[in-house]
Every structure is written in C-alpha cells, then in structure tokens.
Image (cartoon, rainbow, N blue to C red):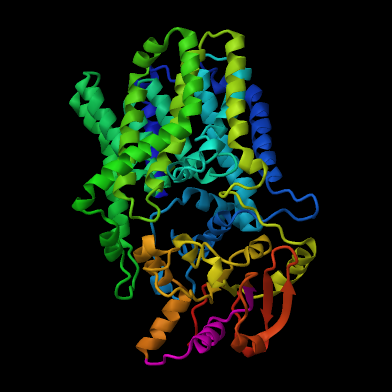
Amino acid sequence: MLPMLLLLAGLLWLLRQPSTANIAVGRHIVPVSRSGSQQLPWLLVLGSLIFLTRYLLLVDISSEFLRTPFQDYVFYARLATPLALRGVETNSLEVFYPQFLAPYPYHYLEIWWNALLVELTGLPSVWCMFLCAFSVMITIAAIGFAAIFAHFQLRRWWVLTLAVLFLTVTGVVWPFLQHISLVQNGALLSSLLLPLQPKLAPIYWFMLLGAAFLLSRHYLAAAVALAVVPLVFVPAAPVAGAGVAMLALYLWLAGQLRWQTAAAMVGPMALVCVYIIVFYLLHSAGYHFPGTSQGQLLQAVVPQFKEIKTLFNIAVGVLLNFSIYFLGYGVVVWCVLLASRRAIAIGKQQHVILVWFAASLLAAAVMRTLGHHFLDGFQFFSNPMVPLTPVVLAILLGAGLENARPRMYGLTVVGLLLLLIVNSYELITDTHPGHVTTRYSPEFLRQMQRVMPTLGARGGYLLADADYINAYTLSADSYTAGNYVSNFKNHYALISLSVLDADSLTTDPRFARDSVQAKQIVHQSTLYRFAKFRAIQNRSTSLDSTRYELVRQAGLSFICVSRLAQLPVVLQPLVAEMYVDSYSGEKLYVLRRRHFLQPADPYKIPSW
C-alpha cells in the first residue's frame, strides 16, 4: 500500500501547482469550504442507506441472528488474519507450514481496511467487512458518481438520485437468454456493486477520479490516479496500463499533448507495473514441491499458436457477451443523447473518454482471450470493465441531461429502475449464484455463540466428494465447511481433512477442463503437504492415520463437517461433544483437550 500513498501524495502535489490550479476541475461544483455543512447530512443519509441495504440482505426474520454471508466474503474476511498476525499480503490461509506463505497478487485495500476495523473494534471480521468496510467503500463510489453528474450542472436532487442508481448499473441478466451457454459464461458482468461485488469499489474510486481529471483535461493527474488501480487490484493492471498508454498515444497523435507530456502520462503506470513485478519476484515462497511452482502453472495456461482460430472466436464472443449484458443501459443513454439533439456534439466533446473506454475494452478482450486456459481468466475482463462501463455511461448520460427538461430526468430514472428490477430478480428471490447466504438454526447458533469462544484457534473441516462441484471448490481455503465459525471467532484457521475421491482429475468431468490447475490447487492443501513431507521422511501411512497425525500435531480443537460428509472412525475417539444444525445439516465436533496441545494462535510454530 505504500506506493499507493506515494502516488496519492504526488497527485496532491500536482493539484497544488499553478498550472493545475487554473484548470476548472470543479467549476460546476460548489466548493466544500462554502457548502460542506450542507453536504454532510446528505452524505450521512447516503451512507446509512447503503448500510441498511446491505444489512437487509442478511436479515432472517425467524432468528435473532443474521444469515451468514456468501462464502467468498467469509474468505475475504479471514484474509485479515495473515495481515494482522504475519503482516503478509497473501490469499493463502496456510498456518501449519509458514515456508509456503508468500505475498501473492490480489486485491488488498479492502482487506487492510477491514483488518484495521477488526483491530479497533474486536468485532467478527466477516461482519466488519460485509456491513462496515464495504458500506464505507460503496459510499465513496457513490460520491464519485455524484461528482461526475455535478460536473454537468444537474440539480442536486437528480445528482443524488442518479449517483445512487448508478451503484446498480452493471450487466443485465436477461431471463430469456440465460439458457444460452455463451450468455451464461458472461454472468460475472452482472456484478452489482451494492450487494454483490463491493470488492471492486477501489477500482470504481480511481476510475471515477481519473475520469474527473479527463473531463477537466488534466491528463497527467488522470494518469497518476489510474496508476493506483493496479496497486489496489493487481488483476486489473493489464487493462489499466493499456488504457493509459493508448490514451497518451492518441493525445500525442491528435496534437493535444507534446511527446514529453504524453511520455510523462505513461511514466507512473510503467513504474507501478515494474514495481509489482519486482516485488513479487523478490518475495516468492521459500519452498515449492516439485511440479507445483508458478512457472510450471504459467506454461500450462499460456495458449499455443495452433489455437489461433479458437482465440479469435473467444475474442468475438467476449465482445458479443459484453454487448448483450450492457445493451439495456446503452439504450437508455443513447435515447437521452438523441433526445438532447446533441449526440454527435457530445461524442466529439467526450472523444478522450471514448478513446480511453475503447482502448480498455479491447485490452480486456485480449487479456480474456489469452487467459482462457486460466481458471480466473474471466476476471481480466470483468474486474476492470464492470466498473469502467458505468463510469463512462455516467459521463455520457450527464452530458445528455445537461439543461434537459424535468420530464427527461424522470424518464431516465424510470428506465434505470426497470433495468434494476430485471437485474435484481435472482437477488430478491435469493437465487443469485453470487449471493447465496446460509441460514443456520437459531438453536445451533446459540450453541456456537457459547462454545466457540472457549475453543482454540485451529480447527479442521471435512467435505464429501459430492461437495466438490468444479475446480474452484477444490480450494482448501475459500471453499470450506463451518462458515458459521466466522460469526463468533476472529483469527482462526480451518485445515482441510477432506480427500477428493476422483479417479483422475483429467477424466472427471468436474475438473477435466482445468485439470492442471486443479492439481495445483489440491497440492496446496495442508493435508497434502503433511502427507508429502511424511513420505519424504519415509513415514508414509494410511489416509486415516495421516489425518489422525495431522489433527494431533496441528492441535485442532474442533472439526466442522458438511451435511454429506462423515467423520472418519479413527477420529471419533477424540470427540468430546457434537452439535448438529437442523437447517444446513452441518455438524461440529469438539475435540478432547487432554489429547494434545491446542494453540490459541493459529500461526503458532509446531514444537515438533
């Protein structure tokens, strides 16, 4: 995060220069010094509305407890543990073998923010993140949209209304098209910022800031703001870098910038990219098993030249998918531009924004195409384009509504609301695949509220073979049983005791397409590493004996078991108490303390 602070300091320095001060960045915005007291109440109302919306997503009217958030949020919240206890920016929750821990490219701004809140309040990390950290981040994004609309001199009521509505502007899930596999493959483009993808909020921040500077023609400041994007969300680096580079080239070729200034625009982004590469090269994991290095994984996911036809088809499909998902909002904006009778003039006026958008879109399509073998390759496209598209649409809409009649404002809001209703059907009916909350029985949660604070920091979990749906679910860190533990405990570890029962990762239809990465994921589990080290020491034993030794040496104090899984017979003598949830069918086994040491610190180094 230090380079981000340095860039922001440089941005503030730029804004204080005489050449910058003369640029009317906010000529349509009332200075804060004169209206801050008037704006603050609206800001508080906006933040409270966003908090309430997120709170209502988890309300269970039949219980005094909230629903447990989607497992991705539980995983993000648990990543505060390696930050707080080890100071490592990693998406690995390995606690038994610290030699495998190393910084990893990910998105850490919201995780740092959440770790700070947890340290200050002592509240459960998952609730701090879902309700507090994300609500603040989304509120800042809403302020950014409000600034964009205020730039075009829209009235305050409409500025606030459109800013809130644009938190929901994303790809539209058209129900009559969801049976088409091509459309299904682009479902992540429908990531609503407000309830579903608040982790993208930092990208919104700096793209909104960059867009504001582009509107004011302060191109160097825009380049510095956009250079922060790779630091807060590393997978967005290629698209952010390509967008700035192509924009600088266009401005130079168009004669709007001297080559020195154009080169200076590219400088901050180039330095950030070099820094990221050097940082991760210097901080690689201290140990790798043979066949599990990132270099070998990279060789497996890089496309070959013979796939050129496939690559072309994927690129076309990606752009087609994007058009389908954002068609609805595109139509709304286009109708407003036509009604303003200034569509061509606005296009010319906002040509810099359009070039930036087009360059970013093409770069995102290229990255999605080249990364089609990579399990998370779709994020190279969706993560930058889901925030950038509403930013550009907001600019075009604001330009079209400038000096418009009240009726046009009303029709625009109606159009945005209709698209929101269509897009929120699965969310309202609690069937959205990206927002599956879990209900546990009130009785079970009362038991967990009493039991969890008395247990140690390390637990285990067991999943059945049928619980593994695809290669994603093989992750021993992000796909677990026992998500309810996060409601009552911070800084805990869950070690997988599960064993996949697939005949072969290359033939099982669940994993065949991503078999190389599936193998890599399986080899990252603590159980695999434990068994591998025992084999190296010529201490190979049966699976049940290996599980028993891992439970003993890791000092597990409880084991969470899914509805479909069963506790192995060899572990049953260790059980002191068992709790069963009548809703989910999950089971918690509390282990006897006298058998082995149960550490209070999940990262405690084993004494053996």
Give how far across and how far down residue 518 sits, in percent.
40, 65
Residue 545 image offset from top left, x and y in percent: 52, 89
Expressed as whole percent of the image width and height from the top left, the position of residue 78 reads 55, 61
The region drawn magenta spans 538-560
- In the displayed structure, does residue 378 sit left or right of residue 58? left
For the point 54% across and 36% down, which residue is it? 176
- What x and y, as percent, mark residue 208? 45, 31
Residue at 46% from the left image edge and 28% from the top image edge: 327
Residue 132 seen = yes
**In this orientation, which residue lies closer to the viewer: 193 or 556?**
193
Quarter holding residue 422: top right
Residue 238 can be seen, yes or no: no
As rendered, which of 296 and 226 lies closer to the eye? 296
Residue 452 vertical placement versus 38 (above, below): below
Q: Is residue 515 above or below residue 540?
A: above
Find out whether residue 340 is within the magenta segment: no
Question: With 210 as the anchor, is 483 left or right in this view?
Answer: right
Q: Height in image: 221 above or below 175? A: above
